[in-house]
Image: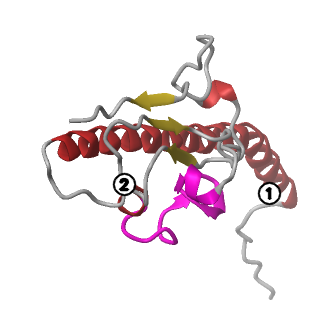
Amino acid sequence: MRTYRSQSGFTLMELMIVAAVLAVLMMAAVPIYQDYVNTARANTHIDNFDEAKRLVAAECAKSLAGGVEVNIVTELNDGNPASKRAVGNENQPAFVDGAATGTEATDAGVIYINGLAAGQVSPGTPITISAGALAVGTTPAHYRTRDAAGAPGLPANYQEPCPAG
């Protein structure tokens, strides 16, 4: 006499329904995740801009007080221009001395600092910081800052007067 065991498992139809539901969920999740990544890139770009402003202001004050200055670009790039990379642009350092490179402030995700003398502040010489171009993959809407016209986007260029003592 033959005995039959009941089979357990999922039918092909059940598996296809699960795959369809997962596909619909992924269609919603991928754009949301991509927007999250781009907003994080924009926030990092702005944080780098703010970090450059703080260090330049501190170095100007230190210069007025007669303190020992550091190379601003090297300091901002964590001591090695090859270590800290531009946001979404791994071919460029995060911070660049605009005068030393002779390049325009157009590379994506790069912060340009102009007015330095051998990487250091020079009393009486204003220092200009610009944010370059939008970080790779971002749009102006991803930025929490306002441009010169008041619209979302890259911050307006910042100028530190760095007065002479």
The spot of residue 35 in percent (x, y) is 65, 37
Q: Is residue 87 magenta?
A: yes
The quadrant in which residue 12 appears is bottom right
* Label ID, residue 68: none
Q: Quadrant of the N terminus?
A: bottom right
Please state the horizontal and vertical placement of residue 77, each as a whole percent of the image.
Answer: 43, 61
What's the residue at 54%, 27% (across, down)?
155
In the image, is 111 to the left or to the right of 61?
Answer: right
Is 152 magenta? The answer is no
Depth order, front residue of 48/33: 48
Dot 2 amino acid type: Gln
- The residue singled out by tag 1 in the image is 15
Query: Horizontally, is 38 left or right of 155 in the view?
Result: right
Viewer-nearest residue: 17 or 87: 87
Q: Is residue 67 above or below residue 145?
A: below
Please name the residue that numbered disc 2 is placed on.
120
**Circle 1 — which element?**
helix
Residue drawn at (57%, 44%) of the image: 41
The part of the chain drawn in magenta is 77-101
Quadrant where the image shows the C terminus: top left
Tell me the kind of residue under disc 1: Leu
Q: Nearer the viewer, mark 2 or mark 1?
A: 2
Name above or below for residue 86 compared with residue 48.
below
Q: Residues within 10 Å of mark 1 (few under 14, many from 20)?
A: few
Q: Bin the neighbour count of mark 2 within 10 Å (Cα to Cα): few under 14, some 14-19, many 20 and up.
A: many
Q: Secondary structure at mark 2?
A: loop
Residue 60 locus on image (x, y percent): 27, 41
Which comes before the other along the chain, label 2 or label 1? 1
**Distance of mark 2 from mark 1, alpha carbons?**
64 Å
Residue positioned 63% across, 61% down in the render? 92
Q: Residue furthest top?
A: 150
